Amino acid sequence: MGNTEKLLNEIMELKFTSKSLQRQARKCEKEEKSEKLKVKNAMEKGNMDGAGIYAENAIRKRTEQMNYLRLASRPNSML
């Protein structure tokens, strides 16, 4: 009985972690969209240096989002 209960707790913990990582990925996606909007506004104002910085931030957020999604999918493949 003890092993079954422990296994169920581990499964729940993995599912919780996966959902948390997916939540963080969605947050990064929103931040990426925000950075892209900043790029557009900076380019319209002629601020190319600022636009480059915002573009780097958007790329960084996209990479971060993909990493979170990759990590979130790992526990599901274990089950």
Image (cartoon, helix red, strand yellow):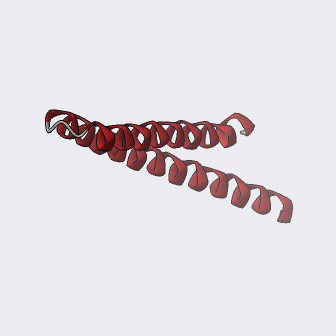
Task: Give left or right: position of 66 versus 71.
Answer: left
Q: Residue at x 28, y 36 (%)?
A: 48
Residue 32 appearing in the image: yes
Task: Give left or right: position of 55 versus 75.
Answer: left
How many numbered marks does the figure carry?
0
User: Could you say which is closer to the camera, residue 49 or residue 5?
Assistant: 49
Most distant residue in the bottom direction:
2
Please state the horizontal and vertical placement of residue 4, each as a whole percent of the image.
Answer: 80, 57
Q: Quadrant of the N terminus?
A: bottom right
Q: Residue at x 69, y 52 (%)?
A: 11
Please state the horizontal and vertical placement of residue 56, each as a whole percent of the image.
Answer: 43, 39
User: Could you say which is closer to the camera, residue 40 or residue 1?
Assistant: 40
Please state the horizontal and vertical placement of residue 47, each as a whole percent of the image.
Answer: 23, 40
The correct choice, above or below, for 79 with respect to 24 in the image is above
Task: Give left or right: position of 73 versus 59.
Answer: right
Residue 29 appearing in the image: no
- Answer with the quarter of the image where residue 29 lies: top left
Task: Give left or right: position of 43 versus 18.
Answer: left
User: Could you say which is closer to the camera, residue 68 or residue 44?
Assistant: 44
Most distant residue in the left direction:
45
Q: Residue at x 30, y 44 (%)?
A: 50
- Answer with the quarter of the image where residue 44 lies: top left
Please state the horizontal and vertical placement of residue 64, each as a whole percent of the image.
Answer: 53, 43
The correct choice, above or below, for 17 with respect to 36 in the image is below
The correct choice, above or below, for 74 with respect to 19 in the image is above
Q: Quadrant of the C terminus?
A: top right
Q: Residue at x 45, y 50 (%)?
A: 23
